[in-house]
Image (cartoon, coloured by chain):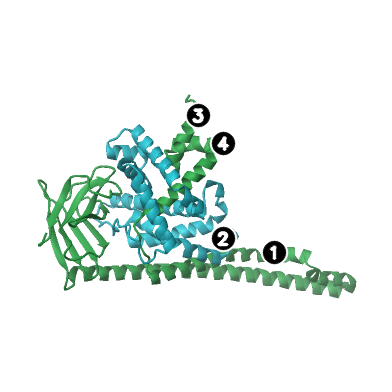
Chain colours: A cyan, B green
Amino acid sequence: MAAGDESALGELYDRWHPLLYSLVLSIVRDARDAEEVLEDALWQAWRQAASFNPSRGGVGSWLTSIARSRALDRVRARRRARDEVSLDEPEGAPTLASAQPGPADDTEAADVRVRVQDALALLPREQRDTMQMAYFGGLSQSEIATATGQPLGTVKTRMRLAMQKLRDTLAVLREEAP
Amino acid sequence: MTAPMTHDEIRDLLAAEAAGVLDPAERAALTAHLEGCAECVDELRVLNDTASLLAYSAPVAELGTDASARMRARLVARAAADRAPVAAAFPALLVNAMATEPESVIPITRARRGGWGGWLAAAASLLLLLGIGTYAGRLRARVAELESATAALRSERGRLQGRVAENERTMASLSGPDVRVVTLAGGRTAPNGRMFWDPPTGRWTFFAHNLPAVRPGREYQLWLVTADHKISAGTFRPGPRGDAMVQAEYKLDPAALQAIAVTEEPAGGLPEPSGDIVLVGATAGG
């Protein structure tokens, strides 16, 4: 794709859009916004393909990072707009926090989901909550400290311990990932 | 002046960077450190890949087949058009190619042997080629612009069609013959809500009013309560006047629902309710 072959973008779409759409929708919680964000994220990946740096992570890591970042930007922009306009705009359409594999889930992805869910379940609840607030909520460590009433140092420790445990538990999956 | 962070202090930042929540000042220190520390670069790569796997813990959602096909087509069309601007440089490419490809050199070489007539013919050919090249370049750039505009219009049409379909689904989920209504009431304050549930389609549409503003970093979370589980139907923030609407899709056995509840939780929600109940309403059978 870095060479500009548009068919590569189609293949990238086929391979990654189910995961990226689920990720984006879980953050923006609105189907229309999720579609736009997904398309924007894949377009950004196409335009910035040359900047992909394997030393910073695999393709999946790069794509989820772009998609997550665009989704969090959309949520922040929506909140800013709502605050500025001061209208009672309805919130979007949240999805249900169900981890059940859906029709779009192929066998391999379903297996990864189960193993990631298992790894998260092994974390102490406060560490898991901290990770999820950061990753899906886009909250900074300071904001998590405010939201949970915990000292900032505690939040940082929870984040570090959670990542280290996930790093060890998911080592096999990570090595299999593209 | 603040002392530079040590290697161990920097290592402690890697997890937060991978999770995307590092403060800007700390990120600047980390970036500077990474320039000269292969060990931390390797560790960050591993943690980045680990964090990316968290995407798999998101609830599975499916983009509709039609919407997916449209998006794929739009992206590939835009990508094809995106390559077209290269053609705008066509005249320069042509001149360069003439200087290197033997076939292109032939007219000029012949001109040297053929006197003024040959020179003029060669010059005319060159001008013609440059003119055609310039025109072709402009034409291709224009085609690229039109393709881009067409892709944008298709995108907008798809978005509007999606909104119309969504509105139609919302109306159906409020007015269908099987729709059930659960009314929710608050405690000391006066918030209230109403859930419209269409079991055949699994569509849930929730309206709430007079909700107090949530504290920073927190959101309301909507729960479907059964005998065995409390199922999250998403998180939301009310508008300035305390109103909110939430829509969700989830198939549930009509006999299983016992109550609908709203709690205040950390932003992003939790797998199980932990905060105070702001609204609750039992079903007729619950």
SS type, badge 3? loop
Q: CA distance from mark 2 to mark 3?
A: 39 Å
Picture coordinates of residue A1, whole percent (x, y): 56, 60
* Residue shown at the point (24%, 42%) measured from the top left: B215
Q: Amino acid at mark 2?
A: Met
Mark 1 residue type: Leu
Which of the numbered marks, if any, corresponds to residue B114?
none
Task: Give the left or right position of residue B91, taking residue A136 as reference.
Answer: right
Residue A8 location in percent, x, y? 55, 64
| Disc ID at residue B93 | 1
Q: Is residue A84 above or below residue B138?
A: above
Of the residues tagged 4 and 2, which is closer to the observer?
4
Q: CA distance from mark 3 to mark 4?
A: 12 Å
Q: Determine the CA span between mark 2 and mark 1.
A: 23 Å
Looking at the image, is mark 3 or mark 1 earlier in the sequence? 3
Mark 2 = which residue? Answer: A1
Proximity of marks 3 and 1: CB atoms separated by less than 8 Å: no
N-terminal label among 3 and 4: 3
